[in-house]
Amino acid sequence: MHFWAKTTSEGKPGISVFDHMVNVGVVAQCLAEKFPMLLQIFKLRANEVGALAALHDLGKISPGFQQKCEEWLAENGLLKIARNSVWDTATEPDHGKVSHASIQDFLSQSGIPVGTAKYLAAALGGHHGRLKFLPNDRGIKPPLIKQTTDGLSGIDWQLERMACAQRIWQHFNAGNPFDSLTDSSTAVWWLAGLTSVADWIGSDERFFPADSKMHPITPMSTAHHALETIGFSPFTVLKDLSFEKIFEFPPNDMQVKCLEAIKGPGVYIIEAPMGLGKTEAALGAAYCLLSAGQATGIYFALPTQATSNRIHLRMDTFLRRIAPGNAGSRLIHGNSWLSQENLDFKPSASGTKEQPTEDARTGRDWFASAKRALLAPFGVGTIDQALLGVVASKHFFVRHFALAGKVVILDEVHSYDLYTGTLIDELIATLEKLGCTIIILSATLTQSRRDRIIFSGQGDAGEDPYPLITGRTEGKSLPPVAASPPKSRKIKVDFMTADSAVEDALAVAREGGAVLWICNTVDRAQKYFAYLNSLIPEELPLGLLHSRYPHWRREELENEWMERFGRCGSTRCGSILVSTQVVEQSVDLDSDLLVTELAPTDMLLQRLGRLWRHERQARPTPLPRVCIIDEEVGLGELLEMQSEKIKKVLGAKAFVYDPYILLRSLETWKGRRHILIPEEIRQVIEETYLERDDEAEAWQELYFENCANTMAYRQKALMSSNVWQAALDDREGVQTRLNETPSVSLVLCRHVEGLNAQFIDGTNAVMEPDIYNFSVAKAIHRNLVKIPEHCFDRIFPNAAFPEYIFENHCVGIVSENGDITARGLKSKIRLHYSNNLGLYIERSSTKEEV
C-alpha cells in the first residue's frame, strides 16, 4: 500500500513514506561522510548513520497521520472507515511518538541491545525538536500511543511499519554496529541533530519535490547537489602559513606560547590582559588544528551581539587568508539573518488538515541563516547559541551536530553570572565529548574559576604568573605555561561626582579627545546622554549606544562610533560616546578618557581595556585616566548601613550586579589612586573576591545572600541542563541567561491598517494570511525593540504578526513627536522614541535625577 509522507501543492498524496525516508537517509549518509574524524570518534559508519536517520518518519505509517490527507482516504476507500473509527481523535496524531515506539521495537528485534535501542529511538523520534518520552526498557506499548490495528480498514499498521523499516535496513545495508551508542554517549545527540538537518534538507521542495511521479529524482546525486547548494561543501585550508603571514604582524611571546601549547582537541585557557592579542592567538591555534585535520571548523562565541558583529569582520579577514575562495564566516546571533537577502528554503506540506505552523517555522528559523549559519564551517556569534545545546531547548541536539569537532572559542568567560557560568561548564564537558577544541579567553579570571574549568575544582594554582596558558587534553592537565607580560602602564583612578565627571569629559572632548562614558543601565545612559546634550557644543559629536534601539538604527550607530573610536578611525575627533555594557568587552574601541559607573572589578578592568588601547603619536591627556562616578554616601557610611539601605543607595546597579560584589569592588578601588595594567590585574581580582571573616554585619548579610543565590543559580542551571524535561523554544537568552524581567517585542510602526503596515524606518509591508514573506519578516524584526513586560497590564498581539514573531509581542504606533501608543500599556508608563535616544521609558513614579 502507498502511504504518503508529503502532500502536493494540490493537497493530494505525494511522495511515499518509504521514498521520503530513503531521501532523508541518503542526505544523512552524505552529511556523515563529510566528517570522517567524527565517525572515527563515535565508531560509526556513514551508511548506518543513513539507515538510522531514515527511520525517523516510520510513525507516519499510522492512521493518525494518514487521515490528514482526505484524498488519500478517498483513493483507498477509507473515508467512511476513518470517520466511523474517529481516526482524527481516537488515534495518535503525533507521528514522532509513533516513530519513537516503532523504532525501539524494530531495533530491539534487529538484535540491537535494549539499552542502546531505547536512546536511539528517543533521539530519532524527537527529530521535530522535542523528545517524546523518557527512554525505558519496555518500549512504548500500543495503548499508550493509541496505535490501531483494526478489522475495518484491513491494515495492520505495526506490521506495515516493521516491513518498511526492514526495507530501509536492507537498502542501506545496515548491520548491528551500535554498541558505542549508550545513554551517556554524545554520539546519540550528534545523530539526532544530523537527522533533523537531513530531514529539513530531504523535505526541501527545491531538491526533493513532493510530487515524485512528476519529478523523479536519483537520491544520491540529488543529495550531493542539495548539500553543495546549501553550503555543506568541504573547505580547503592553505598549508604551512606563518602567524605573520596570516595576521600581518609577528607573534608576541604569549601568542607563540599558545601555538606551542594547543596541539590537539582539549580544553585550554588563555589568560592575558586586554589588547594583547588573545583573539589572534586563538585563531592562530585554530588554523594549525584545521590544517592538521584535527578540526572541522571554528565557532567564535562572544558575550553580546554587538561584540559578535565586530569579531565577524576580523574573522572574515582571517578566513580570506587561510582559505581563499571559500565562504566567509556566518553571523550566528538572533538578528544576523536580517542582513540576508533571500530565504533559501521551501518546505513541502504534510497534509491538508495539518496547519503549516511548527514544522514550517522550524525550517524557516534554521534556514533563515541565524541558526543555519551555526551549521556552517565558520561562525561568529553569541555564546547563547552554543549554550542552547546544553539546556532543554527545542532542537538542542542540532547544536551538538553543528559544533562537533570544531574549535570553539569562548571569549570573556569571566563576564557571566554563576547561572550562565554553570551552563558554560556543562557546555565545555559536552564539547569535549564531541571531539572539540575549546579555547577560553579571559583577562580577568579568578583562580577558583580557572581551577573549576581545568582542574574540576581540585588543587590550588597558588601565585600564578600572568599571562598564563593552562589546559587539559585527553583528560589530563597540562603544565601551566607562563608568557612574558607587556610593559605595565599606570592608569590614574579618580572617584568624582557626576557633575565633575561631566566637566572633565567636556574639557577633554574640547581638546580633541575621544571620551567613553559607560553606564550600567539603559535608563541611566539615556539620562546622561540627555544631560550632556544640553551642555555640549554642536560641533562636538555626542553618541549613545544601548540595546533599546531598533536593529536598523543600532546598526547605523555601531558603524559610526566603532569607526570613530577604532584603531585607525578616519572620523576620530573630540567627541563623547555614552553607552551601556555593550562596548565593555571584545570591542576594539580606543578612548582618551574613560568615565564609568561603579561595577564589579572584573567589569571595571574590561572597561579599562577601552582606554588608551592603541599607541598614538599624541593624545589630549597626559596619562590614561578613569573617572568612577562616586556613590551618594562614602564607604564609611556604607559600612554602617543596614543591608536594605545599602541596596537603595547603590540604586539600579544593584539589580544588574550582586550588591555584595559591588561593595567589595568599591572597597578595592577606593583604596587606589592608580592601577598598573596588567601587573596588578590578578591582585585586584583576588582582593575583590577573597573570602574573609571581618565583614560589617550588613555586608555579611549581603554575603550570605550572595551565597544563597549562588547555590540557587547553580541548582537552577543544573535543572535547565536536564534535556529530558519539556523543551522550550530556542530563543537567545530565554534559558541561557538569568532573565528575571520577561520582555515584550514592541514593533515600532507609523501606522497599521489591517494587513498593511508602515514601520518607523519607512519600510512598507503587506502581510498575507498564511503566507510567509521573507522581506516582511525582515521589516518587522528590523523595527522591533524589546521592553520589560511589567510596563503592560495586558499584551495585545497584532493579528497580522504571529506568522513572523513567535514570542510575546505587540505594536507601538509612533507619532511625529515620538510619543508611542500601545494597547495594554500601564497608566503610569509613557513610551517615547527618537533616533537619538532610542526607545525611552518614562515612569511617572520614578524621580531619579542624573
Image: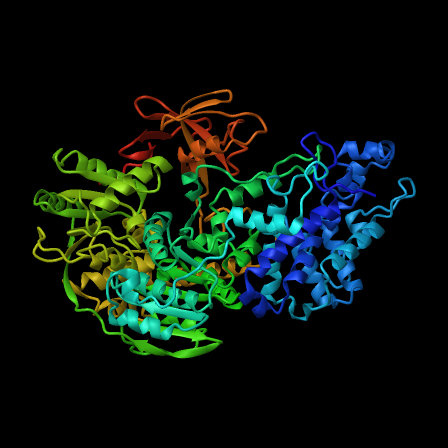
Q: Position of residue 820 (x, y in %)?
A: 37, 26
- Residue at coordinates 75% horizontally, 55% vertically from top-left? 168
Task: Answer with left or right where residue 526 lies relative to residue 536.
Answer: right
Q: Position of residue 377 (x, y in %)?
A: 46, 56
Residue 429 drawn above or below residue 228: below
Residue 485 picture quarter: bottom left
Q: Position of residue 531 (x, y in %)?
A: 19, 37
Q: How is the image coloured?
A: rainbow
Between residues 328 and 337, which one lies in front from this camera angle? Answer: 328
Between residues 600 and 350, which one lies in front from this camera angle? Answer: 350
Q: How many marks?
A: 0
Task: Answer with left or right where residue 36 lies relative to residue 125.
Answer: left
Asked whether the viewer can see residue 702, the reply is no
- Residue at coordinates 52% horizontally, 27% vertically from top-left? 800
**Rendered-image quadrant of the C terminus:** top left
Residue 205 drawn above or below residue 466: above
Asked whether the viewer can see residue 752, the reply is yes
Between residues 774 and 397, which one lies in front from this camera angle? Answer: 774
Residue 814 picture quarter: top left
Q: Where is residue 97 in the image (x, y as percent from the top left)?
A: 72, 50
Residue 445 picture quarter: bottom left
**Rendered-image quadrant of the N terminus:** top right
- Residue at coordinates 29% horizontally, 72% vertically from top-left? 256
Q: Residue furthest top?
A: 753
